Image (cartoon, rainbow, N blue to C red):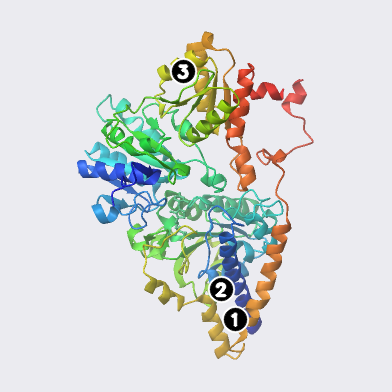
Amino acid sequence: MSATDNNGQMTGREAMREAMRQAMLADDRVFLMGEDVGRYGGCFAVSAGMLDEFGPDRVRDTPLSESAFVGAGIGAAIGGMRPIVEIMTVNFSLLALDQIMNNAATLRHMSGGQVGVPLVIRMTTGGGRQLAAQHSHSLDGWYGHIPGLKIVAPGTIDDFRWMLGPALDDPDPVIIFENGGLYGASGEVSETDPGLPLDRAIVRRSGHDISLITFGGTLPTCLDAAQELATQGVEAEVVDLRSLRPLDDTTIMSSIARTHRAIVVDEGWKSVGISGEIATRIMEQAFYELDAPVGRVCTAEIPLPYPRHLELAAMPSVDRIVAAAQLAMQGRTPEMAVA
Amino acid sequence: MNDLDTTTRAEMLRDMVFVRRFEERCAQLYQQTKIRGFLHLYVGEEAIATGVCHRLRPDDAVVATYREHGHALMKGVSAESVMAEMFGRVDGCSGGRGGSMHLFDAEHRFYGGNAIVAGGLPVAVGLALAEKLAGRDRVTACFFGEGAMAEGEFHESMNLAALWDLPVLFCCENNRYAMGTALARSEAQTDLALRASGYGMPAWSVDGMDLEAVVDSTERALTAIRAGGGPVFVEFQTYRFRAHSMYDPELYRDKGEVTEWREHDPIHMLFDRMVADGQIEADGLAAIEQEVDARIELAVVYADASPIEDIATLERHLYAPNPESPTLQEVTS
Ligand SMILES: Cc1ncc(C[n+]2csc(CCOP(=O)(O)OP(=O)(O)O)c2C)c(N)n1
């Protein structure tokens, strides 16, 4: 069954599977490796059926050895292959952080430009499924801190389908953060590659009152918030960053030039996070465009708790985004409102 | 190997049945969405936690994984507080914050409930280091699956524990699969005790379905460790009868294999032995099940009656509360 049967609609997991299949059919240097990607079919069933189609050499089950198989992906990339390394979730990527940060991100620089690492690492990210502290991290922005890496986070099903190609074409390491909540979500998928550069942000909804700047799992939340705001007479523009490193300053600033107000929404923590980076860039590059301080809606500064009501209260929600946007319309931020 | 006396056998049989029925009740409660998130059941592996924990002293510590309900119960954590934890309620053993994968009970020296594979091993080594530095003869028992043996944290912990002669009992629960990955697909050397012995510690393998063999091995290991002999590694060979978690379609093993292993059910193995030795009636299991089911229902009722936490306290438990000392803000303002 082709995954596009359904009128161009696919789920996130089908879209990523199709992206991997097509990449592997087109280029025999491409292979997938990770824990349970083969026999099990992927811990989120993203690679279901691929072992049968491509065999165990190219859909390669690894032991629980995150550091070793990510490092092996780096080595294989240097050796001329085009590996897609799947780390089950961002939580376990911390065991491979040394390889990612000290090898993948630095080899080109410290070898004086001789040794590049054309590697793609895919991992699930995000909370919201009651998996508790150790299984709910959102470190997408945190990885964006590291020079030498490229960080992307699809927020639409079309990007689940079409981001992998340019990531594999890239001569440097690209990490794709896939929000777990989007694997089961359906969305429209372009029949052919829309040809979007990997590092380009996109305006997903136009509006002239305020910009909601976000990425990944909180994109749908922001689109819902924009809809709600419209019923309250506020026209919000929604900017989908898509890439966290590099950040597309041009798209962000041109949105600010239209709306003069912004809320940054990130499922990561606020302190020392990417939301602060974006707010600072706006201040540096578009200060005189602003009619209000830049607001932020992020996850509460705690490891995510297990109970549903506490987890929901901790994470960005439509209500919190709408409230922050309404405050921005009055020239205020949630922090000021508390004081 | 010595047979256990009648009373001990009866007690341990009841405990294994208790863990089994508790897990099966959890599965039902998951279907009813009372329990959410990830839920990993211990069905088939009960003899290990039961046998090991029975031989630990109350002041010994346990570090376990996300498949740890049985270990918590056998270490003395109350069924009420374990169930309330899985319901995410304030009376849970972790105040509801952790759920199924993060059971904690410091009073019973039960230190989790770790959901990062092999993440508990270094902590167990550190707990044992504290015993050594303090000159105490307490042991730390650390449970993990065979899948964890591929992680760097396993290697580093084994080496450190042996290098420093630390009182750790490494309990490898080899249920043959790490999620969908069979042992032979994840380990170049599938003789796990042989591998462990390479770190310079006593290591052996035992039938983890045979409760009496588990108890015997545990006694041997604990005696050596308490005598100051450093860590011991025991591989308990076992099998998980159910899926890895509640989301597992089990495409990686065939039904026949599961059926075959169910013939080696640890509960039946002990029960049959007791029947043969005239220590229990041939229909004696039903009465035990009834008794433990009643206890489990009390835990469910307790959990259901426990309140959820007020959202106002969302951000607590991040740092130690210390009402005595003023905050920096109070000092400077
Ligand atoms: C570092 C890390 N990688 C991956 C996972 C996902 N995961 C959870 S349990 C598991 C299998 C572990 O198998 P094993 O150690 O044999 O224990 P078992 O589940 O069989 O009891 C995997 C891959 C994880 N929790 N932590």
Mark 2 belongs to chain: B
Please report the residue visible at 54 percent of the width from the left and 48 percent of the height from the top: A131
Other residues around mark 2 within 10 Å, as few (<14) / some (14–19) / many (≥20): many
Tell me: residue A252, above or below residue B5.
above
Of residues A101 and A292, the one nearer the viewer is: A292
Please report the residue visible at 45 percent of the width from the left and 19 percent of the height from the top: A252
At label 1, the amino acid type is Leu
Of residues B231 and A51, the one nearer the viewer is: A51
Q: Which mark is residue B57?
A: none
Q: Nearer the viewer, mark 1 or mark 3?
A: 3
Q: CA distance from mark 3 to mark 2?
A: 68 Å
Determine whether the beta carbon of the residue marked 3 sits less than 8 angstroms from the nearest atom of ligand 1. Answer: no
Q: CA distance from mark 1 to mark 3?
A: 76 Å
Please report the residue visible at 71 percent of the width from the left and 63 percent of the height from the top: B301
Instruction: Answer yes or no: are tags 1 and 3 on the same subunit.
Output: no
Q: Which residue is mark 1?
A: B4
Under circle 1, the secondary element is loop
Under circle 2, the secondary element is helix
Relative placement, left or right, of A54 versus B84 is left
At label 3, the amino acid type is Ser
Under circle 3, the secondary element is helix
Other residues around mark 1 within 10 Å, as few (<14) / some (14–19) / many (≥20): some
Cβ–Cβ below 8 Å for labels 1 and 3? Answer: no
Q: Which mark is residue A255?
A: 3
Cβ–Cβ below 8 Å for labels 2 and 1? Answer: yes
Other residues around mark 3 within 10 Å, as few (<14) / some (14–19) / many (≥20): many
Residue B197: image location, x then y, percent: 42, 62
Q: Quadrant of residue A107?
A: top left
Of residues A90 and A63, the one nearer the viewer is: A90
Residue A314: image location, x then y, percent: 61, 38
Q: Which mark is residue B215?
A: 2
Of residues A158 and A139, the one nearer the viewer is: A158
